[in-house]
Amino acid sequence: MPEQHSDTILTQLADLESRLAFQDDTIETLNQLVIQQSDQLQRLEQKMKLLGQRLQQLQERNDDQQGNDPADEVPPHY
């Protein structure tokens, strides 16, 4: 009887070790994904910042060329 109990404990221990190894692998995989997504997000934020600056420059240039004279504005169509 004690030998059967020992075998059960060893089987349970092996199962727990297997689960732990699988969980460690899953955590590492998820960690790598988070790192990749963080890098991608930083690159996208930088691009958005540059695009925003470029858009602002174009708007300022357009405003300088057009002026803000109400006589230059086209009336709305009804």
Image (spheres, rainbow, N blue to C red):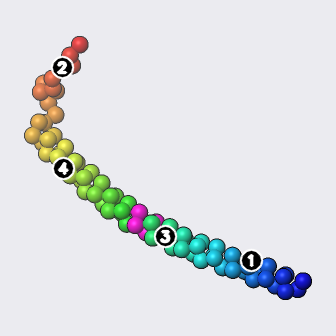
Task: Give, as a three-letter code, the residue at label 2.
Answer: Pro
Local packing at callout 3 (Cα closer than 10 Å; few below 14, some 14-19, many 20+) is few
Quote the CA–CA distance across marks 1 and 3: 26 Å
Q: Is residue 40 magenta?
A: no
Which one is earlier in the sequence, the residue at label 2 or at label 4?
A: 4
Q: Earlier in the sequence, mark 3 or mark 4?
A: 3
Q: Which of the two discs, 3 and 4, sits closer to the camera?
A: 3
Residue denoted by label 4: 57
Question: In the picture provided, is 21 more to the left or to the right than 55?
Answer: right
Question: Could you tell me which residue is drawn at 58 percent across and 73 percent down?
Answer: 22
Residue 16 percent coordinates (x, y)? 69, 76
How many discs mark residues in the rendered view? Answer: 4
Q: Are marks 3 and 2 in contact (CB under 8 Å)?
A: no
Residue carrying label 3: 29
Query: Splitting the image into 4 quarters, where does residue 77 fall?
Result: top left
Position of 62 relative to 46 (above/below):
above
Q: Which residue in the structure is indicated by mark 2?
A: 75
- Mark 1 or mark 3: which is in front? 1
Q: CA distance from mark 2 to mark 4?
A: 26 Å
Residue drawn at point x = 49 percent, y = 70 percent: 29
Are the two marked residues, 1 and 2, in contact with CB atoms closer than 8 angstroms? no
Look at the image and say whether residue 37 sits in the magenta stretch: yes
Residue at the limit of the structure toward the top, as seen here: 78
Q: Which residue is mark 1?
A: 12
Alpha carbon distance from label 3 to label 2? 59 Å
Which callout, 1 or 2, points at the residue further toward the start of the chain?
1
Q: Amino acid at mark 3?
A: Thr
Q: Identify the amino acid type marked 1.
A: Gln
Magenta stretch: helix, strand or loop mostly: helix
Q: Amino acid at mark 4?
A: Gln
